[in-house]
Amino acid sequence: MFSGAISINLDNKGRLAIPTRYRESLSKSMVCTIGLYHPCLTLYSMPEWQTIEQQLATLSTIVEAERRIKRLLLGYATECMMDNSGRILLPSTLRAYAKLEKNTMLVGQSNKFEIWDETIWYQQIRDDITALSTDIENLSDNLKMLTI
């Protein structure tokens, strides 16, 4: 289970150092793809990605929304191998999509990580807090039941 928001600098080659505490859980091979709803990347362990890939395989190629999701997630899915220093190389196409340059945020999301440009991440957090505080009465029943 991945949690926390960690500031990490990309090196000049576009490599991201995975924090030591997560390296064993992720294994050497991971898959990185685009975030569908925000300008970020999503990083999965290989076993987690294989489950998602099986679910994507069941989607229709006739239903437009399902076809688009498959095209985006699978089209950008890139296997990333962790080197002996615990770094993964983020391809330039993925870095460009998420506007990643140097300062990034690695954000745990239970079964995956999101990788954000640090400036965009902090703006997103401000937007999320504002949206939640102004729309508190419209929370789903699932959210209302959380003891947070």
Image (spheres, rainbow, N blue to C red):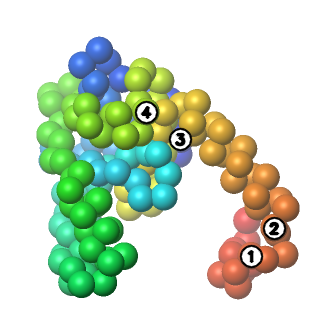
The label shown at residue 81 is none
Nearer the N terminus, badge 1 or badge 4?
4
- The residue indicated by pointer 3 is 5
Amino acid type, label 3: Ala
Give how far apart the Cα atoms at labels 1 and 4 are.
31 Å
Nearer the N terminus, badge 2 or badge 4?
4
Give how far apart the Cα atoms at labels 1 and 3 are.
24 Å
Q: Look at the picture and state if 13 lies above or below 29.
A: above
- The residue indicated by pointer 2 is 135
* Residue located at (30% from left, 40% from top): 94
**Mark 1, secondary structure of its residue:** loop
Q: Quadrant of residue 47?
A: bottom left
Crowd class of label 1 (few under 14; some 14 to 19; many from 20; radius 10 Å): few
Of the residues tagged 1 and 4, which is closer to the observer? 4
Which quarter of the figure is the C terminus placed in?
Answer: bottom right
Whether residue 21 is visible to the viewer of this picture, yes or no, is no
Q: Quadrant of residue 99?
A: top left
